Image (cartoon, rainbow, N blue to C red):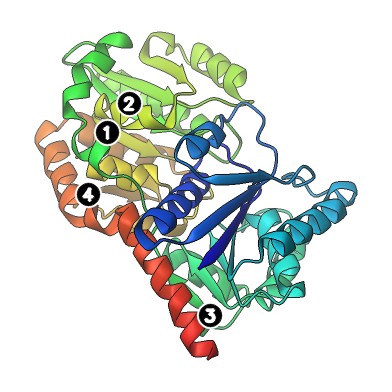
């Protein structure tokens, strides 16, 4: 089977890691011939291009495939994708992310590729965002949904969101959780002390960590607002922010204005293979994004044995189980955020209990091998149904 995956860019991110692991394991476990098409990857978010190539992924860059909507690039990108697919002649085209999803499905459909699949990693619209932008994105998704055989959701919440927007009928959706290499998270405990020492944390510090790009909608400003209350009530709490982006300077300024400079560490961008070590240094993992399919950091934290506090957005509720693996709170509720963080900061026994429960529930569910097996099963199922 020849499989083409298409994604807009290979930055350090959950959708991108999902795509790379899919390419690797479809080839290694199932003998598929896989080629990954991506647009140029630049910017402060980091890149998975080197990792993908080191793992033997057949990677082809589509020069005009950029994230922003721009007809001067989008029209050439469509024809570049179409030409690349025609040369590769895949049995399956599997698209990821909004821009690549629209253009990739259109190109594959025009070539009558036998199987066309799209993964929904997150909705390209924001519920309280601009109405016209939301409407435009939904119209595009409806159009593209008619040009593929199956839509894969990384969480059941994504299916419901798309059903509510009348993107496609229910039978077109299936959920396949975004797989990852779980072993480094299971075995990360030995990395805890060295990482904490590297960043200046004391053995009795309670480290609350957040892993996310420093971009809008990631909720760092909410965390800083809650941190003032948390730090006033527990003098051992420290915050570790992992990631970089265009908001770094403004967030550092906000921390300074709040008088919390000595309580925050900005670790910046770290390689993907260092994430297990960073989580090992944390005692609680917090996720305050306002839009996300199912943030990989949530199962990663739980598999590492760490409790989580998250806004109740999209797929978070499928792994953040209140009073079992952490606390799920309404978005932008700063008081509840501070209260939940304090509950865990003050109770090491609860932290251990929640983390252990999360590890037991979700380790096997998020194995990358299971994701590849389910993808291949889905591809084959479509073939049989078409026959």
Judge depth for marks 3 and 1 and give the one in front: 3
C-beta proximity under 8 Å, tags 3 and 2: no
CA distance for labels 3 and 1: 37 Å
Badge 2: how crowded within 10 Å, few (<14), some, or many (20+)? many
| Residue where numbered disc 2 is placed | 278
CA distance for labels 3 and 2: 38 Å
Give the camera-side residue of 337 and 77.
Answer: 77
For label 1, the SS is strand
Name the residue at 30% across, 32% down. Answer: 276
CA distance for labels 1 and 2: 12 Å
| Residue where numbered disc 4 is placed | 325
For label 2, the SS is helix
Name the residue at 70% across, 38% down. Answer: 40
In the rendered image, the vertical position of residue 10 relative to residue 247, given as above or below: below
For label 4, the SS is loop
Badge 1: how crowded within 10 Å, few (<14), some, or many (20+)? many
In the rendered image, the vertical position of residue 302 relative to residue 143, given as above or below: above
Name the residue at 79% across, 54% down. Answer: 80
Residue 162 picture quarter: bottom right
Left or right for 67, reference 122: right
| Residue where numbered disc 3 is placed | 172
Mark 3 / mark 2, whichever is N-terminal: 3
Judge depth for marks 2 and 4 and give the one in front: 2
Mark 4 / mark 1, whichever is N-terminal: 1
| Residue where numbered disc 1 is placed | 284
C-beta proximity under 8 Å, tags 4 and 1: no
Mark 1 / mark 2, whichever is N-terminal: 2
CA distance for labels 3 and 4: 31 Å
């Amino acid at each position: 089977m020849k499989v083409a995956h298409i994604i807009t860019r290979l930055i350090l991110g959950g959708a991108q890691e999902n795509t790379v692991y899919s390419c690797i394991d479809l080839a290694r476990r199932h003998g598929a011939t896989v080629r990954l098409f991506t647009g140029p990857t630049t910017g402060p978010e980091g890149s998975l291009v080197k990792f993908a190539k080191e793992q033997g992924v057949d990677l082809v860059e589509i020069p005009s495939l950029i994230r922003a909507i721009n007809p001067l690039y989008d029209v050439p990108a469509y024809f570049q994708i179409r030409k690349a697919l025609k040369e590769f002649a895949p049995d399956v085209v599997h698209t990821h992310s909004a821009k690549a999803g629209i253009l990739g499905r259109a190109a594959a459909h025009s070539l009558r590729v036998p199987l066309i699949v799209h993964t929904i990693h997150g909705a390209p619209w924001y519920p309280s965002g601009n109405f016209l932008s939301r409407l435009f994105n939904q119209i595009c998704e409806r159009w593209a949904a008619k040009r593929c055989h199956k839509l894969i959701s990384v969480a059941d919440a994504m299916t419901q969101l798309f059903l509510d927007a009348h993107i496609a009928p229910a039978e077109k959706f299936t959920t396949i959780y975004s797989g990852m290499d779980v072993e480094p998270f299971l075995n990360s405990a030995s990395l805890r002390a060295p990482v904490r020492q590297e960043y200046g944390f004391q053995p009795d510090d309670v480290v609350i960590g957040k892993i996310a790009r420093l971009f809008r909608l990631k909720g760092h400003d909410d965390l800083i607002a809650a941190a003032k209350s948390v730090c006033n009530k527990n003098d051992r709490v420290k915050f570790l922010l992992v990631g970089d982006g265009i908001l770094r300077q403004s967030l550092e300024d906000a921390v300074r204005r709040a008088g919390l400079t000595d309580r925050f560490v900005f670790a910046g961008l770290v390689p993907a293979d260092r994430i297990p070590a960073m989580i090992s240094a944390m005692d609680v993992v917090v996720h305050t994004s306002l839009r996300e399919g199912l943030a990989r950091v949530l199962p990663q934290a739980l598999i590492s044995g760490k409790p989580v506090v998250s806004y109740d957005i999209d797929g978070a509720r499928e792994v953040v189980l209140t009073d079992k693996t952490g606390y799920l709170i309404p978005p932008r509720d700063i008081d509840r955020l501070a209260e939940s963080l304090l509950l865990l900061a003050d109770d090491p026994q609860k932290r251990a209990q929640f983390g252990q429960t999360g590890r037991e529930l979700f380790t096997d569910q998020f194995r990358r091998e299971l994701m590849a097996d389910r993808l291949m099963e889905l591809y084959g199922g479509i073939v049989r149904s078409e026959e």
